[in-house]
Amino acid sequence: MSVEDRITELEIQLAHTQRTCDQLNEIVTQMSIDAQRRDREMSRMVGQLKDLKSKVDEQGPSLEDEKPPHY
């Protein structure tokens, strides 16, 4: 194999490696965006759950403390 052939082969491999790195970077970027969206959604849901719990607590004794009617 000549030096030119070896250089050409290395350039081809480098091009494939660069393309793979670009694709992986796109995937990581998209996953980061998705994770941030899920974090915001989770924070919103936690806030809603806390609000709901405080409203239930304001209404008096919890239904969990009451015995079912068949007891």
Image: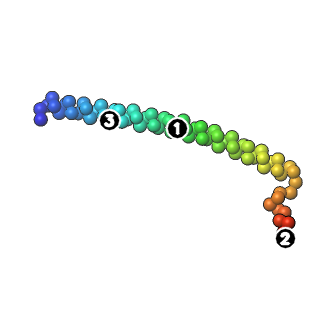
Label 3 secondary element: helix
Horizontal side, residue 17 vs residue 57: left or right: left
Q: Circle 1 — which element?
A: helix
Q: Residues within 10 Å of mark 3 (few under 14, many from 20)?
A: few
Question: Which numbered disc covers residue 52?
Answer: none
Residue behind mark 2: 71
Q: Is residue 32 above or below residue 60?
A: above
Choose the circle earlier in sequence order: 3 or 1. 3
Q: Is residue 53 above or below residue 37?
A: below
The residue at which mark 1 appears reads as 32
Q: Which residue is mark 3?
A: 17
Q: How is the image coloured?
A: rainbow
> Spatial distance from mark 2 to mark 3, Cα to Cα?
70 Å
Residue type indicated by callout 3:
Thr
Q: Nearer the viewer, residue 5 or 63?
A: 63
Residue 45: image x %, image y %? 69, 43
Q: Is residue 13 left or right of residue 43?
A: left
User: Which image quarter is the N terminus in?
Assistant: top left
Q: Please state which amino acid type lies under the numbered disc 1.
A: Ser
Residue visible at 87% across and 54% down in the picture:
60
Query: Callout 1: 10 Å neighbours few (<14), some, many (20+)?
Result: few
Question: Of label 2 and label 3, which has the lower sequence position?
Answer: 3
Residue 23 percent location from the top left of the image: 40, 34
Viewer-side label of 1, 2: 2
CA–CA distance in space, label 3 to label 1: 22 Å
Q: Residue at x 86, y 57 (%)?
A: 61
For disc 2, the neighbor class at 10 Å (few under 14, some 14 to 19, many from 20) is: few
Judged from this view, the residue extending furthest toward the right is 60
